[in-house]
């Protein structure tokens, strides 16, 4: 059965957000909703899935609060199981810049609609910045975009200092998956003296949903934070897969490497795997094969986060849209 997937976020004063956690967990269980929902003083951020009716009732409960009315919800349909459980998380920020004082309500960049984005990024005076992390940029980005080579969004401020120093006269256009990181990143630039800052309204997902592929300046697929892994133009499911061990997107050459073992390792993580870890992953693969033969589901342990690569904070969990 097809799953409906929705993404949304809203910056708003939300001091009582911890009180919402048990309520939303109970409602999510009742309605069969899965996914990740982040609550913080500054608002709400979510990627959720489920059957259309239950998911609509769950979202309606949230939007009944006037602060979250008219949420900019992006909907997609997929035949894949996108999540296995619902996680309602309490965080200092709904997207982790590392500075809760930076709020879009105190000033941020100018929205650019997808229809106008191509013209903007074709301007040679505009620096186009991909605000996403390294593993996301790996599978797709806009023509001519700068890759900050960040492992977490918390490294954004360091990137800004290293790239521009005290030069605040640059024209900067930025983009991210669904728009939330750009809200924060553009606010950070504006509140630190940059005067010409633009960001793609609704992010890459909005662009891929609305722009004709023949006119598109997007190359590749767009990483998403669920078991689909990626989407393409029209928000159709992409073909990218992840290495189960390190969760890095796999390229065609990775499959040909002697270090690639299905569900166990890829060229990036194979040299770092301990014998115990390798055997554990192999056992998981064996159990999954048995489950397929029995025509049953094997959920097992949850998928490892990206901290197995390099950075203990690199989970990607804060970047749900």
Image (spheres, helix red, strand yellow):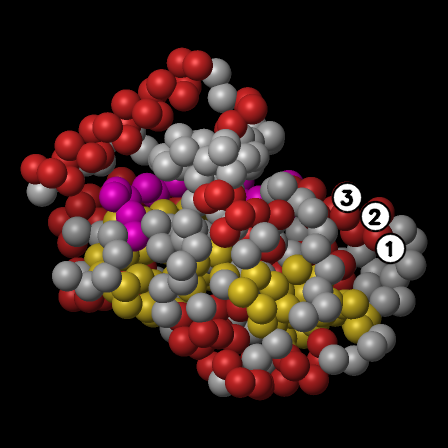
Residue beneath the point at 33% across and 68% down? 76
Q: Are marks 2 and 1 in contact (CB under 8 Å)?
A: yes
Q: Secondary structure at mark 1?
A: helix
Measured as percent of width and height from the top left, residue 82 is found at 30, 52
Q: Are marks 2 and 3 in contact (CB under 8 Å)?
A: yes
Looking at this view, is 282 or 166 the one in front? Answer: 282
Left or right for 231, reference 203:
left
Left or right for 233, reference 22:
right
Q: Which residue is mark 1?
A: 164
Q: Which residue is mark 2?
A: 161
Magenta segment range?
82-99
Q: Main secondary structure of the magenta part?
A: loop
Note whether residue 60 is visible: no
Q: Which residue is mark 3?
A: 158
Compared to 253, does 211 lie above or below?
below
Q: CA distance from mark 2 to mark 3?
A: 5 Å
Measured as percent of width and height from the top left, residue 293 is found at 11, 38
Q: Secondary structure at mark 3?
A: helix
Measured as percent of width and height from the top left, residue 163 is found at 84, 52
Q: Name the quadrant containing residue 145.
A: bottom right
Asked if residue 226 is among those painted magenta in the image, a careful observer would answer no
Q: CA distance from mark 1 to mark 3?
A: 10 Å
């Amino acid at each position: 059965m097809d799953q409906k997937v929705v993404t949304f976020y809203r910056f708003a004063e939300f001091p009582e957000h911890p009180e919402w956690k048990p309520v939303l967990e109970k409602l999510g269980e009742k309605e069969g909703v899965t996914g990740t929902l982040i609550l913080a003083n500054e608002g709400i951020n979510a990627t959720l899935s489920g059957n259309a009716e239950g998911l609509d009732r769950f979202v309606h409960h949230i939007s009944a609060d006037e602060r979250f009315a008219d949420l900019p919800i992006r909907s997609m349909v997929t035949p894949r199981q996108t999540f296995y459980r619902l996680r309602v998380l309490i965080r200092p920020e709904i997207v982790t810049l590392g500075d809760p004082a930076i709020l879009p309500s105190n000033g941020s960049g100018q929205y650019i609609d997808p229809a106008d984005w191509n013209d903007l990024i074709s301007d040679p005076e505009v620096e186009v910045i991909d605000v996403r992390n390294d593993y996301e940029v790996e599978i797709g980005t806009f023509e001519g975009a700068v890759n900050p080579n960040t492992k977490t969004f918390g490294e954004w401020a360091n990137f800004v200092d290293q790239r521009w120093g005290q030069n605040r006269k640059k024209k900067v256009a930025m983009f991210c998956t669904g728009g939330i990181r750009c809200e924060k990143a553009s606010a950070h630039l504006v509140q630190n003296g940059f005067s010409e800052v633009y960001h793609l309204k609704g992010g890459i997902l909005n662009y891929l949903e609305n722009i004709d592929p023949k006119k598109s300046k997007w190359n590749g697929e767009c990483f998403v934070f669920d078991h689909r892994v990626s989407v393409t133009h029209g928000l159709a499911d992409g073909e990218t897969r992840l290495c189960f061990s390190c969760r890095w997107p796999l390229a065609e050459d990775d499959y040909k490497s002697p270090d690639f073992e299905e569900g166990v390792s890829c060229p990036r993580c194979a040299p770092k795997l301990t014998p115990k870890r390798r055997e554990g992953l192999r056992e998981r693969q064996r159990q999954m094969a048995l489950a397929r033969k029995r025509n049953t589901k094997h959920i097992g342990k949850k998928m490892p986060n990206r901290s197995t690569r390099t950075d203990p904070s690199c989970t990607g969990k804060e970047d749900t849209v």
